[in-house]
Image: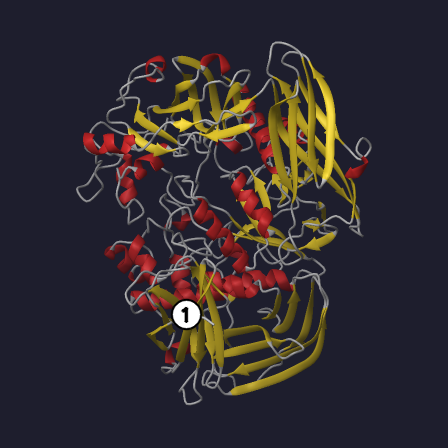
Amino acid sequence: MRLRIRHARSTLLALTLATPLAQAQAQANYAATQVAGEAGTTTAIGHWLIQDSAKAQQSGADISAAGYATRGWYPVSGRATVMAGLLENGTYKDVFHSDNLRAVQVPDSSGNLFVTPWWYRSEFVLPAGARGLHTLLRTNGIIASADVWLNGHRVADSAGAYPVHEIDVTRWVHAGANTLALDVHPADPRVALTTSWVDWNPTPPDNNMGPWRGVDIVRSGPVELRWPQAIPSLSLPDLAHADLSVKVEAKNLDTVAHDATITGTVAGVSLQQTIHLAPGQVQVVAFSPKTTPGLALDHPKIWWPIGMGDHPLYRLDLTATVDGTVSDKTGATFGIRSVSSSLTRQGYRRFFVNGKPVLIRGAGWAPDMFLRHDPARMQAEFDYVRNLGLNAIRSEGKLEDRRFYDLADRDGIMILAGWECCDKWESAARTGGAPWSAADEKVAAESMASEARLLRNHPSVIGFLIGSDNAPPPAIAKMYVDTLHAADWPLPIIAAATPQGTAETGPSGMKMAGPYDWIPPSYWYADKLGGAFGFDSEVSAGATIPRPEDLERMLSPQEQEALWKYPRLRQYHASADWSPFAVLTPFDDALAHRYGAPTSLADYVAKAQLDNYDNVRAQFEAFNAHMDAANPSTGVIYWMLNNAWPSLHWHLYDYYLNPAGAYFGAKKANEPLHIQYAYDTGAIMLVNHTLAGVHGLQARIRVRNLDGSVRYEQRVRDITLAGNRTRQLETLPAIAGLSRTYFVELELAGADGKPVSRNVYWLSTQADVLDWRHSNWYLTPLTRYADLTGLRTLPAATCAVQATTRREGNEDVTTVTLSVPASSRAVALFQHASIRLGAHGALALPIRWSDNDVTLWPGESMVLTARYAAQGAATPMVEVGGWNVPTRSVPAGVEPSE
């Protein structure tokens, strides 16, 4: 068992216990969970009282008995891990600020709180008069494991973060109040198949121990229905027909035989079948076009990924009736689509949806590090994914519950799920790693079966990676594949996120060659390592610096000073462990060489935003540029989408959901119709991520010196761009008389003249030069940096700001017009707009901008829109500032109603 010992300091956190009166009042708010009395209902345990077993030393029989005294226990929500529950109770303060989290490891003189089991205790009430019903207890994954006690009886054990276990507890329950208790065992991802965090952020002090996906009370009659599945077979390439198969598992819970009639509807088609079940028998009930001709669907509604079409969903509902009485109900939502994959000539995996090749443009998912359940936050994050123009998310471990996939289905976001790296999940695959026991193999098989049942109906899911950094060894790989096939898994099964394979899956078709730390934008266009070819399973340029207001929230004053002054000092919010990422030296050296040594924290952050925007944009644009190449790019997963805690690394938006340079660089690159510049050849390219061809496009290309003078201009009219394709317009010629730092300004308009895409680059006549021979797994060094220091000489620019706000449903929509007068002394470089709620209020977050971090020359203007949750009466204030534009604030008054 891991026990980290650290020296406590007076500046660190202290364990604070609520007063007995306060805890008693808090416990009183946690009434017993009321369970429905009807068959076919599922009720989640809504809350628990938790306590360390070192303080609650009674037996499970005592703790799960009625009347047990819980004075001093902590009331927590139904899916709280131990640490999440303690945070709910205010036990620790500001754990995300500075290195305060360290103190949680040694909270008091008694030692670490998390090396002993913790008790979870709750009560649920069953209604009287529900004769003939069975009561089942469903655990949806417990980290690391638990003994389950009910009304004084030990009824089961449950091990593993992902297995769903269902126990018929009818003989142990009664009408009225019942007491459930979980003896949750400590978690250690090195020795158990749970969750871990590697170098993403610090390891949670409790290793996420607890019922993180919740516990349910299920009521059923004598025949229970489980695991409904709809399996579409779509005709290609015309998409005009789909054969639909339906399966559901029926289980006789009684000790006598029963006849059960299974009825339901799917896609408007009625289903019915009568079966006979012996005592305890389980039978798969199947419907197909052969038995139910209506399941041969003509002209079905087709689910497409975002940007390629709509995302319609169908509903499956099933009921089991025994002796004329409803015994159980179940259902599922699904979509009709086809997913397949194959290997390119070079051996890289390419995905096809409904027969069309799709460039996967995604990012890696991270939940909250304490696995706190927050539906509103998850909704906001999916809104960000859509706003970013991404079409995919990769889940490397930390697999989420049904709500995550429901949102992905709704929004057309493809999900590439899989197991995680670097802990027990891959120990048997690593040289010198510990082999798995029979108990480990059992948990892994149950995990795979449970995840397959959870994922298989969701049209958003496009495959499963049975390994991450390492493919599983032969026996485990076969177990995974056999388990998936037994669950009628219809999607690609991939050996690993690295270029490995297994006998059952074949080659992975993936690459994981880095980088994870700073490299210049031109890197992405190379034909080496992590360059834009094939399928890059995780890759980025490393450090991603939040905006100043978030740095103040996460870093102490001393850490803020070190961030810009001392690039070789370790930052706790870069990596809590001693790893190459604990310092930001490569990133900081690049900023100093390319933009000039920072003179203050504000100057450092401003340069970081420029660099993050430029680099993230280049990464996605390079994969855009090569999607039709001879060695095509087929997928890229930016590492990462988000952070589990406030971090200086690897995110497109930070923990506080505050979009910054990296966000808007990614958003720019992933426009549906896009104009872009190639760093390797100087080519100007158009990209169409939609399936519809476009005619009559108009492009304007300008190259400007630092003073704004135009050194080259070209207009291209009446352009045709096929769907799901790229097109090169021209390659910039050699241009005489360029300033050492210069700009490329690109504009794309539709046939009607309305703007479609606008893109501005700041470049140098001195190119970055990469030292490929000295590359390693996370970094390629440079022998020369581009010179962008000329940007420091730009005079102050003038920008006029106008803003109004209107209410649309539950959202406020603020329109911001930025105008640079012809009299301005210079370009208004990299203007960033934000919105505060009132003159001195908090930032409006989360927020979705149409564009941001924009650059305008004298005489140019641009309209931005922002959407955010509707606020009260306070007038929104729009703040706009930029590289060389003083920050100003203007009210965004509410438009009068018509």
Looking at the image, can residue 468 be seen?
Answer: yes
Give the left or right position of residue 739, taking residue 352 as reference: left
- Residue toward you, 281 or 733: 281
Q: Position of residue 97 (x, y in %)?
A: 29, 49
| Relative to 327, residue 649 above or below | below
Residue drawn at the location 35% of the way across and 50% of the way down: 573
Give the left or right position of residue 273, taking residue 641 as reference: right
Residue drawn at the location 61% of the way across and 31% of the way down: 330
| Quadrant housing residue 605 | bottom left
Looking at the image, can residue 520 be seen?
Answer: no
Q: Secondary structure at mark 1?
A: strand
Residue drawn at the location 39% of the way across and 30% of the way down: 209
| Relative to 889, residue 194 above or below | above
- Residue toward you, 4 or 23: 23
Q: Position of residue 226 (x, y in %)?
A: 61, 27
| Quadrant housing residue 607 | bottom left
Q: Amino acid at mark 1?
A: His
Q: Which residue is mark 1?
A: 832
